[in-house]
Amino acid sequence: MKKLTIVFLLVLGFFIMPVKAGAQTEATLITANPGEDSSSMMNISWNMDTSKTNGRVVYTKASDTNWENATTVYGDKNLVDVFHEREFYHYFVELTDLDSNTKYMYKVGQDSLSEQYYFKTGGSDSFNFLWISDWHGYAPLPGRTDKNEAMIRTSLLIEPDIDFIFSTGDDLAYGSDYEAQEYLYNKPQYKSHMFATTVGNHDVMNVVNGEYRTNTDAFFKNTHYHPQNGYEGQVGASYYFKYGTALFIVLNNEDINYGHSSKSVGLAKAKAWTQEVIDNNPAQYIIVAMHYQWFDGRHGRTSAQYTDWRNFFDENNVDLAMAGNNHVYLRSKGRIYNDNPTGTNKGTVYMQAPSSDGERGVQHGDIVNNEHIIEEVWSQGAYTIGSIIVNVTPDGISHRLIDNVGRVRASGEFDSRYKDYNFNKEDFLNSIEVFTNENEKIITANEEGIKFVDRIEYYDDETLLGVNYFYQVKDTTYKLQQNEFNNLKARVLFSDGTISRVDLFNESYYHLKDVSLAVKEENLELRWNYDKEEDFNLYIYENDIFIKEVSVLSNSTLLQGVNLESTIKIKPKINSLNTYYTVKYNNIGDANLDKEIDLKDAQLILDYLSGKTILSETEKLLLDIDGDEEITIIDLTYLHLYINGNSSIKSKESYNISFYNYEGLLIETVKAYRGSDITPPSLELKEDLIFIGWDKSLNNISSDLEVRPIVVWR
């Protein structure tokens, strides 16, 4: 009986013996990393044995509970052999054309698919993410990752509506510890959320059987698939992504500090790339994350990262600078600019996350350095376990520091730098214009809308032609691969949920020629030539005040009651921001502006020469018949000859025409006489830009002009 009992217990022990995480599935390290534009893109990453050569992702909306509308995408793969005595395929798929602000589910594998995993796309102007850092996952000490999991679980009880999880690095004790990652990614929170992380100094460490070997970020690159948009040598390790209204830029400190023969080389490359990312991706919020701390939470001393980056952050309007490594929570006194708190919405907020493994924390101390910058620090010594819940809204960003039992240990908020910025929707709508380039229609809009516009839909009558998601500078240009339309119009969806519709004018407006003003009866007459057949309206303004609209086919219109000294503008639509044609009545010789050149004008010259009157600048311009910038007896002679029918008057009145490039820098200023045509200077463009034309007419000059190029992204 005793022997039978022992056998029974052995069998029972076999059945209750813990099974290694992932042992019954084909795929391991399954995770959803952000796509470059996470409102419509998501990156799925997983690993499989080298016998599995045809891995795939099956995905659908979470609401499609029966998977009836599921899509299958076969993955790309790399053979990975950087881990000790381990070889596998790293699979990755970039999902595109996803619906914004939507929860999706997915499975991966080849012959046998995994359980369901989930992620949520961005797109809302309000979202929450959980920031957790430095848990140093280590296979022989699984309790570290268990504490990280418990901390995330506690945070989700406080804020269930977490959209994704973000880490500032040191997810692992050693990057070479593959088993620690298997254990981590089998935790439920990493199955239910998108996860973005940062290369920490421990994540590159290479330790085999207790022996330290050459560090490498290859461990990180071959177990994740973040956006592949980093700079040379850092593709997959440094990256950026957009989620909602925020641009996240994630940098690898190890490359900046140690990856080059000198630190300055790595720092310069990282800054140049970050600058380019910010320039090309305007967003309401700019968030930069690195692993190394800005300040030491033990005493407040400045760290190298703050010294290296604070001026760059000042110059580029970075809103939030995130870091870890120090194992102490720390935040600045609101926004910091020029090394001082601003008390306004100008500057950068600096924050550091605590550790979360309960074993390797650091005891914070009294802040004796940078007291003018640092607002608060917190830790629990070696046993620190904490996380930060971050809430992003149109008005600002707030956060709560949570300890391992769910207590809020600290909190703070700061306003969006655009909170008091009044976005003029009407101006944006009026900025939308259509141009023809070869066989394409190119639609452009003011890039100011990037912060406030979700997308623009283009229609021909009721037929949808395309959708322009408005997230990056390149999105200010949209191409339609056709030329003919019945009724081209745009539907603009703003980030605040409002919708506007715009009829898009035809660029035939730019075919007007010989625009001029003449006297007719007691009024002025605006005249132009137009060599096309298409009819549309022109909108006439006097000194920026709308006065009338008229058919382009009429070739002229009477302007009743218009002041002769007014500037007349022609616009393509009501309240348009663009004025291509500008003209003034300034007939040489008609100094008293009575619409006639006669003895009254000659008398003005006599009175001026005899000292009886002082001429205004307008009168001087109109009476300077010979163009020598002086009023003399010669001008009077020319005027009498004209009045008596013995000569004609040719204007020498000149104007300054200033040409600017697409960056707003002055190229050249040229002088042009009234009524003349001018040739523009040559224009140098970046390879990714197309020149459409100049934004002002260069024919029949009648006023000073500032002229800028109309350019679009390829």
Image (cartoon, grey):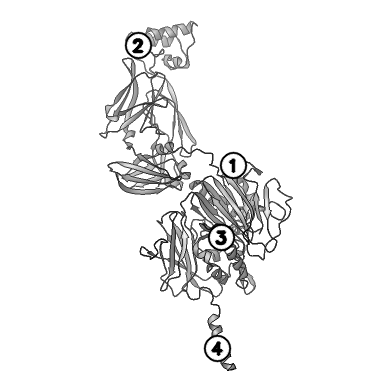
Q: Name the residue under label 4.
A: 8
In the rendered image of this protein, does residue 83 appear above or below residue 476? below
Determine whether label 4 and label 2 are within 8 Å by CB: no
Which label was assigned to residue 642?
2
Q: Earlier in the sequence, mark 2 or mark 3?
A: 3
Real-space CA distance between mark 3 and mark 4, rounded to the nearest whole angstrom: 42 Å
Q: Is mark 3 on a helix, strand or loop?
A: helix
Alpha-carbon neighbours of circle 2 within 10 Å: few (<14), some, or many (≥20)? some
Find numbered disc 2 in the image and state the secondary structure of the residue it sits on: helix
Residue 152 falls left or right of residue 709: right
The tag earlier along the polypeptide, 1 or 2, is: 1
- Point out the tag, 3 or 4, that comes first from the N-terminus: 4
Q: In this view, does 542 lie above or below 680?
A: above
Sequence-wise first label, 3 or 1: 3
Tell whether 356 sits left or right of 679. Answer: right
Foreground residue, 440 or 344? 344
Dot 1 or dot 4, earlier in sequence? 4
The amino acid on which the numbered mark 1 sits, given as a three-letter code, is Lys
Name the residue tied to disc 1.
346
Residue named by callout 3? 157
Q: Can residue 47 be seen in this view?
A: yes
Rendering coords of residue 133 (x, y %): 60, 60
Amino acid of disc 4: Phe
In the image, what residue occupies the spot 50% across and 47% down? 283
Q: Position of residue 67 (x, y in %)?
A: 38, 65
Amino acid at the residue labelled 2 = Tyr
